[in-house]
Image: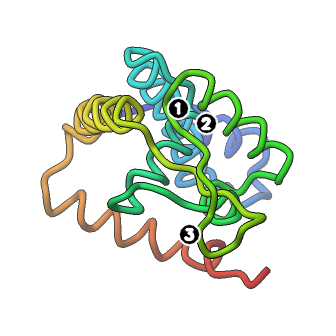
Amino acid sequence: MEDEVDRLVAAWRRERPDLDVEPLEVLSRVSRLARHLDRARRLAFSEHQLEPWEFDVLTALRRAGTPYQLSPGQLLTQTLVTSGTMTNRIDRLAKKGLVERLPDPSDRRGVLVRLTDTGRDRADEALAGLLAQERAILGELSRAQRGELAGLLRQLTAPFDNVPG
């Protein structure tokens, strides 16, 4: 089975035989897959009236477990955005009734962001929709192939995820 990357690599090999274009065979496919995954995610989220960034914040809170709350600083760490961006996101989610701000009992100047019941339901529904989309994307692979691919991708991404600072 031939794909667009095969055609792209063949063209570069013809035009630039002096270069080793082998990395394109893997990373161009990863890049193309990322674009397809981004589209599938946006579709899954839009079906639940969520933007990708809203899903990120809501699911960070949902993964925290009962009572589904984190400090803004903890949310920053999990979503990799700036403090100003997070403040804006929390404001917008609170306006929609998906999160609420509560005083932090351990720091009278601090606040906690808690998922509302509506926010939890929306996060759960969107996650189920996302998983259906992702299952379809992986549908051509066997369970063993998915495991092997996950391991190989982990090997490539772990050094980026474990960089201090």
Q: Residue 53 carries which label?
A: 2
Mark 2 to mark 1: distance in Å? 12 Å
**Which quadrant: the N terminus?**
top left
- The circle on residue 38 is 1
Report the residue at 82% width, 53% height from top.
83
Tell me if I can see residue 6 in this picture: no
Disc 3: which residue: 157
Q: Which of marks 2 and 1 is nearer the N terminus?
A: 1
Question: Tag on residue 140?
Answer: none
User: Whole-percent x and y of residue 144?
Assistant: 15, 63
Could you classify mark 1 by the number of other residues whose Cα lies within 10 Å: few (under 14), some (14-19), or many (20 or more)?
Answer: few
Q: Is mark 2 on a helix, strand or loop?
A: helix
Disc 3 secondary structure class: helix
Task: First in sequence, mark 3 or 1: give its number.
Answer: 1
Image coords of residue 73 (percent x, y): 70, 64
- Give the residue at the far left of this rendering: 143
Q: Against 143, is 13 above or below?
A: above
Name the amino acid, label 2.
Trp
